[in-house]
């Protein structure tokens, strides 16, 4: 039984490694991945690497070209926008459907998160900031107390992280503005003013990621 589990474990390990390398930007879009090179680097056979790449293709991270390798994909503008649209809808609904007690409890926790965001940006620790920013936005969905909404949101977290990483220049160029927008969102959430929250979140996404999302009317 243990022997049969090993290929699956190796494939999981390969999948996690390659996915993390893509998310951290160490494997940039356009990079061609070799099964042989990955297998050697991970000290495993090509079989689990091939399984990992197939899974990553199903998830939209790579495109496999037989006999050549797997190409790291660039998320299209439409894919990024659509993911942001869904996050916008879920975060806004989280505020709309929250009850005051749950909302205020999470809002108090987010005040500490904002302080840590500030410290991370002051130290130029962008990875820590990205993680904190994702936790910050996720909490707005959590305010609804709806497990299904939260599960849908969590499925978008890889793309959310990648969007933040690829927007790092915009964010680090104006950290005070980004933090001010986060504070405004928190103030809206604490009041339960979901319409103001939706408008401010749309503006925040547009400025941070260069997107037309949410309430913006597309031409």
Image: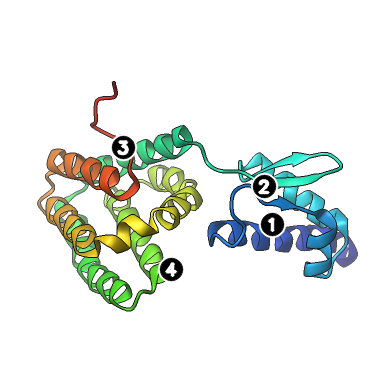
> Of the residues under marks 2 and 3, which one precedes in the sequence?
2
> What whole-number distance in Å separates the C-alpha atoms at marks 3 and 1?
30 Å
Location of residue 76 in the rendering, given as x and y in whole percent from the top left corner: 50, 36
What SS does tag 4 mark? helix
| Residue on which disc 4 sits | 127
Q: Is the Cβ of the residue at disc 1 closer than 8 Å to that at disc 4?
A: no
* Residue in front for this viewpoint, 9 or 121: 121
Q: Is residue 127 left or right of residue 34?
A: left
Q: Is the Cβ of the residue at disc 1 closer than 8 Å to that at disc 2?
A: yes
> What whole-number distance in Å separates the C-alpha atoms at marks 4 and 2?
22 Å
Q: Is the Cβ of the residue at disc 4 closer than 8 Å to that at disc 3?
A: no
Location of residue 181 in the rendering, given as x and y in whole percent from the top left corner: 18, 55
Q: Is residue 5 visible?
A: no
Seen at 26% across and 40% down, the residue is: 93
| Residue on which disc 2 sits | 56
Q: Is residue 146 left or right of residue 76?
A: left
| Residue on which disc 3 sits | 89
Q: Is residue 49 visible?
A: yes
Seen at 75% across and 41% down, the residue is: 64
| Residue on which disc 1 sits | 15
> Of the residues under marks 3 and 1, which one precedes in the sequence?
1
């Amino acid at each position: 039984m243990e022997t049969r589990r090993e290929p699956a474990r190796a494939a999981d390990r390969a999948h996690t490694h390659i996915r993390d390398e893509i998310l951290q930007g160490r494997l940039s879009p356009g990079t061609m991945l070799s099964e042989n090179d990955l297998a050697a680097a991970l000290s495993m056979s090509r079989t689990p690497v091939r399984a990992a790449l197939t899974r990553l293709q199903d998830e939209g991270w790579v495109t496999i070209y037989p006999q050549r390798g797997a190409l790291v994909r660039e998320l299209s503008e439409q894919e990024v926008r659509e993911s942001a649209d869904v996050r916008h809808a879920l975060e806004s609904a989280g505020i709309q459907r929250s009850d005051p007690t749950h909302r205020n409890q999470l809002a108090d926790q987010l005040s500490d998160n904002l302080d840590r965001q500030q410290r991370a940006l002051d130290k130029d620790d962008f990875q820590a900031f990205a993680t904190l920013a994702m936790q910050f936005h996720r909490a707005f969905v959590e305010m609804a107390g709806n497990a299904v909404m939260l599960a849908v949101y969590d499925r978008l977290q890889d793309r959310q992280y990648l969007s933040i990483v690829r927007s790092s220049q915009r964010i680090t160029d104006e950290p005070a503005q980004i933090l001010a927008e986060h504070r405004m969102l928190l103030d809206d959430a604490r009041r339960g003013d979901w319409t103001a929250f939706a408008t401010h979140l749309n503006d925040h996404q547009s400025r941070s990621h260069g997107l037309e999302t949410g309430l913006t009317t597309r031409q």
